[in-house]
Amino acid sequence: MLNEPLRNSQYSLSFWSNNVQAFDISIYISEDNALIPLLNLFSGNVPVLSWDLHELSFSVPDIDLSNKSLVVTFTSSTPQSIKIDNFKLYPSLAKIESSHFDRRGFLISKIDVNNRIERYEYDDLDRLKIVRDFEKNIIKHEEIKLKNN
């Protein structure tokens, strides 16, 4: 829920998707249980490689969104389900980083402001073992050697 007006602002929308060939992205304002169309951001086909990054920019006209919500919809024209990860909607001048944790609270990945991913792997004793970059190259490797007396 947004509590301040948007004033001719530039916004960015980014997300990773998998298994999507053709889809539409629309933004609505939710008011009194009704959806009021605001923007149709994207309509078309995209290549399916595995997980693909999508980045879109758009302007929002002067709108008072006090006590209203923005609703973003993804609609696929193919029978596959849409898989979306790391969805971000933010002012274009903002710098966004995100971190992902597993159920135990261990950091498993970070995405920097340029949408590059670092992945973290742990050994059987839950110690950090390997850090990989966005191309899955090892950038840090921790090896603990125990010495017997």
Image (cartoon, helix red, strand yellow):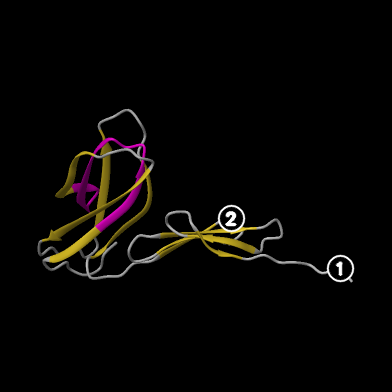
Residue 23 part of the magenta segment: yes
The quadrant the N terminus occupies is bottom left
- Residue labelled with disc 1: 148
Q: Earlier in the sequence, mark 1 or mark 2?
A: 2
Query: Dot 1 lies on which element?
Result: loop
- Residue labelled with disc 2: 103
Where are the magenta residues, as a range?
A: 13-35
The residue lying toward the viewer, choosing from 92 and 127, is 127
Three-letter amino acid code at the position of disc 2:
Arg
Residue 141 position in % (x across, y down) = 59, 64
Question: Most prominent secondary structure in the magenta stretch?
Answer: strand
Could you say which quadrant of the image residue 89 lies in?
bottom left
Residue 147 position in % (x across, y down) = 82, 69
Three-letter amino acid code at the position of disc 1:
Asn
**Circles 1 and 2: CB atoms closer than 8 Å:** no
Neighbor class of circle 1 (other Cα within 10 Å; few <14, some 14-19, many 20+) is few
Query: Dot 2 lies on which element?
Result: loop
Position of 112 relative to 20 (above/below):
below
Q: Residue at x 30, y 70 (%)?
A: 95
Residue 2 position in % (x across, y down) = 26, 64
Q: Residue at x 86, y 68 (%)?
A: 148
